[in-house]
Each structure stands twice: as structure tokens, then as C-alpha cells.
Image: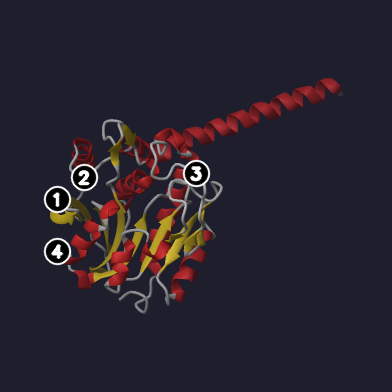
Amino acid sequence: MARISKRIKALIAGGLVYFFCIHLLAFEADNSQLIDHLKQLSSKEFSGRYPGSKGHALASRYIAQNLSPANHNSTFFSEPFHYDYGFSRKIGVNHIFIRQGKLFKNKFIIISAHYDHLGKKMGKIYYGADDNASGTAALLSLKPWLESIDTNYTLILLATDAEEYGFKGAKAFLSESKVRQKDIIFNINLDMISYGKKHKALYIAASRNQPELKSLVEQVNKISPVKFIFKNKLDSNSISSLRASINLHKASDHYEFHKVGIPYLFVTGDNHKNYHSPKDTFKNINLGFYSNAFESIKNLIWEVDQNLSQKTAI
């Protein structure tokens, strides 16, 4: 019996190794493009993507190249804008990919993520892997997926610039873009999505007085590998560079959409120790969690497109 037991144990162990190897390979095949985008956007070459720097220009060009349409139902364009920061007048660039919907061609759902970050400080690169290469890489990886499906609404992927300096790109998009503000019905904003609650969940903040959004998210949670937990405020964290609590309602570009009456869902993660530090690097990202989070975000986008009622949509 002892010999048989050892043999069975060996077979089981071998089977488990095979199982995990197969799933690891599947993960690499399924979302390898997502991971490649994250690695490139948070690379030394892009050096923290500070607006006006060489690394920022390289990141901007990279985003434009990867949002280039693959079929006639999609369009892409970039929109430069001016903004004031301190005593300087600066130029930012937003990138816009549009996938035409089947039922409501002139009603737009905006999926946004900012691509700028802090650049270099005191000779150290602030790579911004989680903040917000993670959201931008997801945006780029959503593009081929959107081109493979049919949506009810027209979906727009918006890569905003100068978010770190007062949501300047979102403000410019809403006030200056050829995409008319009155045709935008909803915003899903992705910012810092690779650090979840104990690598099991992401937080989600929603427009107030929109009870329908809770039921939409609950439906997504039933089928998604990473769950969404509703939260209005992140707790203070003594080990984070930003030790104070964070009001998620006002934390990122979605706040600009809210201010003009456009409802939103904001997807984000924890106030973690690498936030706004040189340690926010690709190697510190849990790639398995990030890949699963991306799948959950796709489910969220699909649910919103398919089941957002005209009551919630403005």
C-alpha cells in the first residue's frame, strides 16, 4: 500500500504541475498583449511619461499606433490642447478611438484612462506602472476586442493627457473635442487597476443617485474572476506616499464627466505603498491578478452597453 500511495501521490503531483502549466500558458496566450503594453508603457524608455518629456512623446506615439483602426467601423484621431500649469502654457494630446455601435450610433459610452505620469524626480524615474500604465494598457487591449464584437452604443476609448495636473485632458475633451458633449451618455474610467484588495477585488465608485448601476455591477460580479466592491473613499495608509484618505468621487478624470452631468463608473485599486513612488514598476505588478481584472472590466463594459437603461443614460 505504501508503494501504491507514493505512486498515486507522484501522479497527482504531476497532474497538478501539468494543470498549472497549461493554465499559465493559456494566461500568456490570452492576455500577452495586455502585459506587453503594460511593460512598454512603464519602461525606462518612456521614463515616467512626464508631459513634455521625450518619454511622454514616445508613449503618446505608442498609444496612437496601437489605437489605429483595423476595419471601416472604427475611426481614430488625436486632439492636441493647451493648458496652464503654474506659470507655463503647455500642450497636451488626447487620443480617441471610436467603435460605431449598431443601435445607438450617435450615443457614446466613453472608456477613459490617463497615460501621463510624474516623470523623473531627484534623478529617479517614477515609472507609473499601476498609475496609470495599467489603465492605459487595458485601454489599448480593449481596442481589438471591441473590433471583434457588436455593441449597442458607440464606444469610445479615450486616452487622456495631463490628468496628474488637474484632469486637464478630460476637461479639454469635454469642452473642445469634435465628439459632442451632449451625445455622451456614460463614462467608465480606469485608473490604477493592477493593485486590488488582497489581489482578489477592485474598487468601484459610481454616480450618486443612480441605483441601477449597483444592479449592473452585481450581475458582472456573478461571472467575473475579479469582483468589484463599491467604495466611496479609500482609507488612509501610513505606508503610502499619499497617507490621507482618497475621495474616489473626485479622484480622477471621471469627476470632470460628473461635473457636466454625465454618469460614471470609476474602477480603481488600493492606496498602496508604491503609489507615486519610484517603486511603482512593472516587476511589482501581480500579472495574474491584472490579467483577471482586465477580463472583469470587459464584462463590465459589455453589461453597461447591453443593459444600461435610457433612465440612467442621459
Local secondary structure at mark 3: helix
- Say what amino acid the circle numbered 3 marks: Phe
262 is higher (above) or lower (below) than 166:
below
Local secondary structure at mark 1: strand
Reading the image, the residue beneath label 2 is 51
Q: Residues within 10 Å of mark 4 (few under 14, many from 20)?
A: some
Reading the image, the residue beneath label 1 is 90
Residue reaching furthest to the top: 3
Reading the image, the residue beneath label 3 is 289
| Front label number (3 vs 1) | 1
Visual colour scheme: secondary structure
Q: Nearer the viewer, residue 71 or 204?
A: 204
Reading the image, the residue beneath label 4 is 176
Residue reaching furthest to the bottom: 311
Q: CA distance from mark 1 to mark 4?
A: 16 Å
Q: CA distance from mark 4 to mark 2?
A: 19 Å
Work out whether mark 1 precedes mark 4 in sequence or the reverse, and give the earlier one: 1
Q: Is residue 19 visible?
A: yes
Labels 2 and 1 touching (C-beta < 8 A): yes
Picture quarter containing residue 264? Answer: bottom left
